Amino acid sequence: MSTEVEETRERIMQAAVSCAETSSVGGFSLEEVAASAGVSRTTIYRYFPGGRPQLVQETATWEIARFWARLAEAVEDLPTLEEQLVAGLVIGRKLIQKSQLLENMVDSEMLELVAAVQPSEPLVHGVIRDYMRDLLIKEQAAGRLRPGMTPELGADYLMRMTLSWMASPTGLDLSDQVATHSVIRTQFLAGVLIDASEAMPDPELG
């Protein structure tokens, strides 16, 4: 795909996000998106031949991908898995709350958007799972995985917990660092990592 084609597609999808923020997902028309993107309705069909349903689906998938990319970049330099998960939960929830489109993605009553996102769920889950697995491979190398736990099993569990708590952190004040660390430690990591006091010795140190 050429740079020009990709730039035009992204401009149209960004316009769709803007229209969804203003008029809601169910309220915007292709004419509104075309006007916002500075293209014709025909141009939208050239890039999204399936029309509005395809535009909504691909825009939702694109926005989710951008969301996770921003989140990964924001936490990548933090020194421990616990700190990465805490920051990811806090930052992720803030990003969701700032975006009407992302907020609606976790609202089961937004039927059109929920239906649009479903086909891309396996891909999204796979990306998150792969990211978590890479983090857990490092924990495994350091001797911090619990006996019987594998990076694959742990990654699937952490992916599901992250999505669930990010969508609805019921009863948790994410501005409370102590409480958030406690939730990550006891509900995310307790079954995945051994306690610090049980950490295996570094083989380099004998």
Image (cartoon, helix red, strand yellow):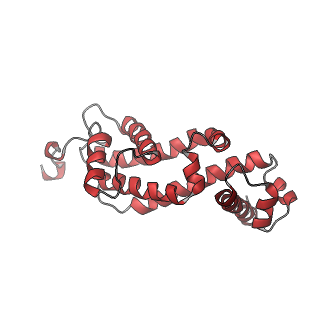
Picture coordinates of residue 51, whole percent (x, y): 80, 48
In this rendering, position of residue 114 left or right of residue 199 = right
Q: Residue furthest bottom?
A: 38
Q: Residue at x 58, y 49 (%)?
A: 104
Quadrant of the image containing the N terminus: bottom right
> Compared with residue 180, is residue 76 higher up or lower down, i.e. above or below?
below
Front one among 179 and 162 = 179
Picture coordinates of residue 8, whole percent (x, y): 75, 64
In this rendering, position of residue 137 left or right of residue 45 = left
In this rendering, position of residue 85 left or right of residue 21 = left
Where, by quadrant of the figure, is residue 200 drawn? top left
Front one among 105 and 43 = 105
> Compared with residue 14, is residue 151 higher up or lower down, i.e. above or below?
above
Q: Residue at x 56, y 43 (%)?
A: 107
Picture coordinates of residue 149, whole percent (x, y): 31, 34
Total marks shown come to: 0
